[in-house]
């Protein structure tokens, strides 16, 4: 019996023995000439074109209640939009193969399994390199975009600045947010500690939130302002936003926190500066800083 070590070794200057395997490019062409390759390419284009409007459609529910109401939410929407566009070719190709296989290659009882047709694309260098390079480029784009957008959002949310370093200038507003099963309470330390159950915010002024919880973990989510941070018992988490649109928006709990979690919501009123100050005065809070 012959083992691998017993095989004759070609002298180094002898050319490779000829094979009847066509070169890579020719095999790509052969693959593309197969009838199913054409069908899948056409289906990919059709499905891709049909999916493209999804990028816009996805923004519709996001904007129903008035988003984006801050620069942060604008960044988030732009990211969702471009991520959808970039995902379309991959999704379209996968669905094209699926749809084509379901229609053309469905089995019937009594069918004999067809012979495998060469040449397989999986061992084709050009095919493999192109496929790997294309998907890597897409993944790289998503990672770079994601990191840049995240840095921007973090910067806009003042999340990295600790409370004692946050600017205490007259323009900024501090709100202490307390979550408990299943209500939200807001306290305004610059306005005689006025307490409300609706979140009043002035437009175009930086707002700093100190968020905590009295019982379990909740999550402070300003839907149209693109702010979301955990409310933990025994700890204060910080975030911030500058609302840039007047209106009534939604605040929801985004962490399953018990039986009435789904109803743990209230509204956010973004008001002109003067209206905000008069609401504070009506509630008994003069401006103290
Ligand atoms: Cu909750």
Image (cartoon, rainbow, N blue to C red):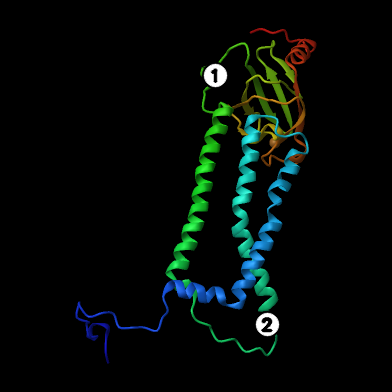
| Residue drawn 65% across the image and 14% down it | 189
Q: Residue furthest bottom?
A: 1
| Residue drawn 63% across the image and 40% down it | 78
Q: Is disc 2 placed on a helix, strand or loop?
A: loop
How far across and down, in percent of the image, does residue 80 sit?
63, 44
How far across and down, in percent of the image, does residue 272 sit?
75, 17
85 or 213, which is in the foreground?
A: 85
Q: Which residue in the protein does label 2 denote?
A: 107
| Residue drawn 28% across the image and 80% down it | 16
How far across and down, in percent of the image, does residue 253 sit?
70, 36
Residue 87: mark: none
Describe residue 147's horizontal placement relative to residue 239 as left or right: left
Q: Which residue in the protein does label 1 denote?
A: 166
Q: Quadrant of residue 81?
A: top right
Describe residue 233's horizontal placement relative to residue 6 as left or right: right
Q: Earlier in the sequence, mark 1 or mark 2?
A: 2
Q: CA distance from mark 1 to mark 2?
A: 67 Å
| Residue drawn 68% across the image and 78% down it | 104
Label 1–label 2 contact, CB within 8 A: no
138 or 15, which is in the foreground?
A: 15
Q: Residue furthest right?
A: 282
Q: Crowding at label 1, few (<14), some or many (≥20) Cα neighbours within 10 Å?
A: some
Q: Quadrant of residue 185?
A: top right
């Amino acid at each position: 019996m012959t083992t691998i070590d017993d095989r004759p070794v070609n002298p180094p200057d002898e050319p490779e023995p000829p094979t009847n395997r066509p070169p890579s490019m020719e095999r790509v062409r052969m693959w593309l000439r197969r009838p199913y390759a054409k069908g899948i390419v056409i289906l990919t284009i059709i499905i891709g074109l049909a999916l493209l409007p999804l990028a816009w459609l996805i923004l519709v529910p996001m904007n129903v209640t008035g988003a984006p109401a801050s620069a942060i939410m604008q960044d988030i929407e732009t990211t969702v939009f471009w991520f959808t566009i970039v995902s379309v070719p991959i999704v379209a190709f996968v669905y094209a193969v699926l749809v084509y296989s379901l229609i053309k290659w469905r089995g019937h009882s009594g069918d004999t399994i067809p012979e495998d047709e060469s040449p397989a694309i999986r061992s084709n260098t050009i095919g493999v390199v192109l496929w790997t390079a294309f998907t890597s480029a897409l993944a790289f784009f998503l990672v770079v975009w994601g990191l840049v957008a995240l840095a921007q959002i973090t910067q806009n949310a003042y999340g990295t600045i600790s409370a004692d370093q946050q600017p205490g200038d007259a323009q900024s507003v501090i709100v202490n947010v307390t979550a408990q099963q299943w209500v939200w309470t807001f306290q305004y330390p610059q306005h005689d500690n006025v307490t409300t159950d609706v979140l009043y915010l002035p437009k175009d002024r930086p707002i700093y939130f100190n968020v905590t919880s009295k019982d379990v973990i909740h999550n402070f989510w300003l839907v149209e302002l693109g702010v979301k941070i955990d409310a933990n018992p025994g700890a204060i988490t910080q975030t911030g936003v500058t609302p840039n649109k007047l209106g009534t928006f939604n605040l929801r709990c985004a962490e399953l926190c018990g039986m009435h979690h789904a109803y743990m919501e209230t509204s956010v009123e973004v008001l002109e500066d003067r209206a905000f100050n008069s609401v504070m005065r009506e509630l008994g809070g003069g401006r103290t800083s």
